[in-house]
Image (cartoon, helix red, strand yellow):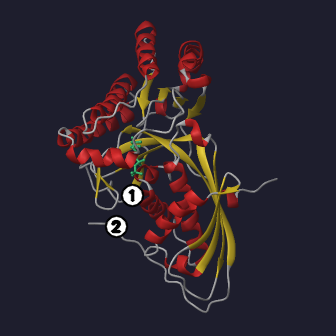
Amino acid sequence: MSYSFKVNKFEKGKAKRRGYVAWRSPSNIALIKYWGKHGRQLPKNPSLSFSLTEAHTDTSISYETREYESDECSLEFYFEGKPNEAFKLRLTGFLNSIIEFFPMLKYMDLHIESSNSFPHSSGIASSASSMSALALCLCSIEQELFESTPEDKFLKKASYIARLGSGSACRSVYGGFCIWGDEGSDQLYTDDYAVGFDDVHEVYQSLHDDILIVSAKEKSVSSSVGHQLMETNPYAQVRYENAEAQLLQLKEHLSCGDIMAFGKIVEEEALSLHALMMCSDPSFILMEPNSLKIIEEIRSFRTETGLPIFFTLDAGPNLHVIYPDNIMSEARTFIEERLIPLCEKGQHIYDFIGTGPVELSKVKTS
Ligand code: DP6
């Protein structure tokens, strides 16, 4: 059964309202990857991720309601302090596509500002954090104009809307770990929105995720194209079944704290994602020579020391190095000495698991 939520109708003729909402939303890193979609942004397999802290997007919306209805959303868009027409066009298209969920959008003028904590050209995808921040802002405006909803319903709707903007964004509205997609084990998880997963052993509660920028170049294949290529990938069906099985196993390793078994699945997932791209038609190799060197270094270091340090990758050449906080000192020395020299201009972000989005407009400044 698919999810439905209350759609608040905007009543014409009400007094003018203006307001301001702002959210900071983190990026997230998938451990079980979402790769392949169908219908309206529905995943072909369930995915599991954790939210980050340092890599995030801040989005604010000033709004003013008006009497008359317009066919399209009316907005101004500023990215990192400057008007950005290309982004505005994309955003207008997206907002128009979700008017059915927020009819209020036809009756307001919006001024949207957004900025990322990481440089636009760092090779780090911003769609998850930006779409999540935007969805949270829209849900907050709705709360201000209509009745307020309990937190779990609020987050479900924000996750649902974020998903329509970018699939992986639906996982950024939560802190810690979460699962998006029906994984067959019970009724808890759904393709419509992500749900938090908190049956997690303490060893994972302080995970680090250091992002190593091997290349800051724009990706040669967008995620959308990558998802599309799964439609003709000869291994697609096997992949979807395997992802489901991997997710069930990973959940167990997360619960019981078997971090070596956890790391094995995390690395297999990253390499499967890239293997799928390599054998799609057309084929893509997104790893760079230094991505492979870093992978080799991490594996050797793990063999030398027995420490639980692992890698994962998004659909690009940059590495995420994952390890628990109790080995931070050894891990950082290793990363600084052996991995950062392999990064483009030494670029990296020391990131870690986060507590989720923050409503900036409600944070008191002292
Ligand atoms: C490799 O969420 O960017 O990062 O839904 O088309 O916006 P769209 O794709 P997107 O795909 C993310 C792919 C991934 C894996 C993941 O985050 O699960």
Q: Residue at x 32, y 44 (%)?
A: 35
Q: What kind of residue is marked 1?
A: Tyr
Tell me whether the residue at label 1 lies in contact with that at label 2, contact meaning CB atoms closer than 8 angstroms. yes
Q: Residue at x 50, y 39 (%)?
A: 218
Helix, strand, or loop for circle 2? Answer: loop
The residue closer to the viewer here, 106 or 18, is 106
Q: Any mark on residue 193, and which?
A: 1
Residue that carries the numbered disc 2 in the rendered image: 3
Looking at the image, which residue sits at the far right?
A: 366
348 displayed left or right of 308: right
The quadrant holding residue 54 is top right
The x and y percentages for residue 138 are 55, 67
The disc label shown at residue 353, or none = none
Determine whether 273 is above or below 107 in the image: above
Does residue 148 appear left or right of residue 16 in this picture?
A: left
Q: Where's residue 291, x and y in %?
A: 44, 23
Name the one closer to the observer, 134 or 190: 134
Question: Quarter of the image holding residue 300?
Answer: top left
| Residue 146 rendering spot, x and y as whole percentages | 56, 78
Distance from Cα at disc 1 to Cα at disc 2: 9 Å
The quadrant holding residue 311 is top left
Disc 2 residue type?
Tyr
